[in-house]
């Protein structure tokens, strides 16, 4: 019997859930897919206010991670209190994801590897070696790496390593 993922992030959109899920799947490509789209029924319309047959939820995977997108209406907006962190092995991967996810997003919300996409979702695009830079045995090196990171929007692995090394 297949196991069920017990914790699945649910992203609340006004009415862009399907469009956003398709965009994210096309951005991550590998091991990413739309699994299921469900529609609002006529039942409960007085509460949900949606047209019967319109998209209610989209279940999708990004690099094997399950997520749900919900068309819940305009009541709630995304903010930086919650973000999706993507750990990248290479600068090329950071560059590709940053370029793709930042298009149409809020440029003023870009700092220290964080960006906000065109749907308002916050992302952290970070290199796998980040913990090593900030938890190493030498506080002076970690401080230099931190100072360098604080000046960046998109993280630069080579520059972070250079700062760490002195």
Image (cartoon, rainbow, N blue to C red):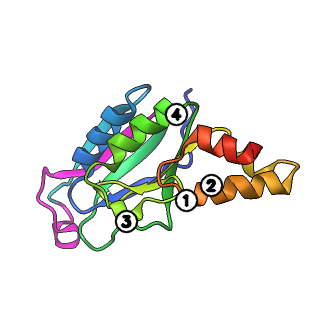
Report whether 31 appears left or right of 51: right
The span picked out in magenta is 43-63
Report whether 42 appears left or right of 94: left
Where's residue 29, x and y in %? 37, 28
Q: Which residue is mark 4?
A: 91
- Return the mark for residue 148: 2
Front label number (4 vs 1): 1
Name the residue located 53 percent from the left edge and 47 percent from the top edge: 155
Residue lying at the far right in this picture: please name it.
Answer: 137
- Return the mark for residue 108: 3
Q: Secondary structure at mark 2?
A: helix
Tell me whether the residue at label 1 lies in contact with that at label 2, contact meaning CB atoms closer than 8 angstroms. Answer: yes
Name the residue located 33 percent from the left edge and 69 percent from the top edge: 77
CA distance separating discs 2 and 4: 16 Å
Q: Which residue is mark 1?
A: 151
- Return the mark for residue 100: none
Q: Residues within 10 Å of mark 2 (few under 14, many from 20)?
A: some
Front label number (2 vs 4): 2
Tell me whether the residue at label 1 lies in contact with that at label 3, contact meaning CB atoms closer than 8 angstroms. Answer: no
Front label number (3 vs 2): 2
CA distance separating discs 3 and 4: 22 Å
């Amino acid at each position: 019997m297949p196991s069920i993922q017990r914790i699945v992030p649910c992203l609340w959109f006004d009415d862009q859930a399907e469009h956003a899920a398709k965009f994210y799947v096309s951005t991550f490509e590998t091991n990413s897919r739309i699994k299921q789209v469900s529609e609002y029924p006529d039942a409960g319309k007085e509460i949900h206010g949606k047209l019967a047959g319109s998209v209610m939820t989209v279940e999708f995977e990004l690099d094997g991670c399950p997520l749900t997108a919900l068309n819940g209406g305009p009541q709630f907006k995304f903010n930086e209190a919650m973000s999706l962190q993507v750990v990248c092995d290479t600068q090329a991967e950071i560059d590709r994801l940053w370029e793709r996810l930042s298009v149409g997003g809020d440029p003023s919300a870009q700092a220290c590897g964080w960006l906000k996409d065109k749907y308002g979702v916050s992302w952290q695009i970070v290199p796998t070696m980040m913990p090593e830079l900030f938890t190493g045995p030498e506080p002076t090196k970690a401080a230099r790496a931190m100072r360098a990171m604080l000046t960046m929007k998109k993280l630069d692995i080579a520059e972070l390593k250079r700062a760490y090394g002195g």
